[in-house]
Every structure is written in C-alpha cells, then in structure tokens.
Image (cartoon, rainbow, N blue to C red):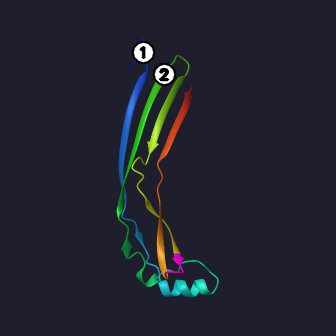
Amino acid sequence: MLGKRKQNVLSVNGKVTVQGGQRYTPADVTASKLNYEAGRPDVVYDETKAFSEQYDPACIVDFTISYKITGKKCNHTIAFEGLNLLQKKVPYENTYNYKKNTVETYDSGISLPNVYYRISF
C-alpha cells in the first residue's frame, strides 16, 4: 500500500505454468509423399495409431508488475506484463519436406511484452 492515505497498491505477480504432454497422432510419411505428389501438400496421419505419441511438457513463465491508484469515483491501473519470458516453444504444425522425405514439426513460442492502462468506474 502506497500513497498519502495508503490507498494505492503496487503489486508484483509471477506465474509458472507447466503445460503440455499433449498427445498426437504420428504422421504417415509414405502417404504424405503420395499426397504431395498428387498436388495436395497436406500431411497424412496414421489413424491406426491415433494419439499414441506425446510431446514433452512445456514450462511457461509470466510476470506482471502493476500500480493501482484508487480514487473516489474511479480507479486507474497501469501495468507491464511479460508473457512467456523464457520463450518456450510448443509444437505448432507439421509439414511434409519433399527434399528430405520427412514430416517436420515446427514450433512456435514468442515472448510477448504487454503494457496497459485501465480505468475502472
């Protein structure tokens, strides 16, 4: 609590999320190659092994620091958030690589800074 009347609030928050271990169906490389040669670039999956594989879990760290000013008729909050600070990548999509004759998994994971200002009535 800060301010002359101890009505303003400075807060620091952190969050660690362990997510993942998501199950997926493995790709059928031979069928994907035939599909590619037929002009369809989509990956074909082996449905006889549906959800038999599992990705590794991901640990995602978020951080927020905010300052809230409490008034008589409204409150003002200014904050900074750092989302996915460790830039942990998670599986995003599978594509067929015709040069290597393999199905490759592409990962996605960005760190996102966010600054916001909020007025509450």
Q: Residue furthest toward the front?
A: 99
Check residue 94 in the rendering and tell me which mark sits there, or answer none: none
Does the stretch in magenta take in 15? no
Residue picked out by circle 1: 3
Q: Residue furthest toward the right?
A: 39
Going by the numbered disc 2, the residue's amino acid type is Ile
Give the extent of the magenta segment. Answer: 96-100
User: Is residue 95 depicted above or below 113 in this figure?
Assistant: below
**Mainly helix, strand or loop, the magenta region?**
loop
Give whichever of 1, 42 is nearer the camera. Answer: 42
Are the residues at dot 1 and dot 2 in contact (C-beta closer than 8 Å)? Answer: yes
Give whichever of 106, 67 is nearer the camera. Answer: 106
Q: Position of residue 109 (x, y in %)?
A: 46, 56
Horizontally, is 43 left or right of 38 in the view?
left
Q: Residue at coordinates 46% horizontally, 83% vertically from top-left?
A: 46
Check residue 69 in the rendering and tell me which mark sits there, or answer none: 2
Does the stretch in magenta take in 99? yes
- Element type at marker 1? loop
Q: Residue at coordinates 46% horizontally, 39% vertically from top-left?
A: 81
Q: Position of residue 84 (x, y in %)?
A: 43, 49
Q: Position of residue 70 (x, y in %)?
A: 48, 20
Mark 1 vs 2, N-terminal side:
1
Q: Residue at coordinates 40% horizontally, 40% vertically from top-left?
A: 63
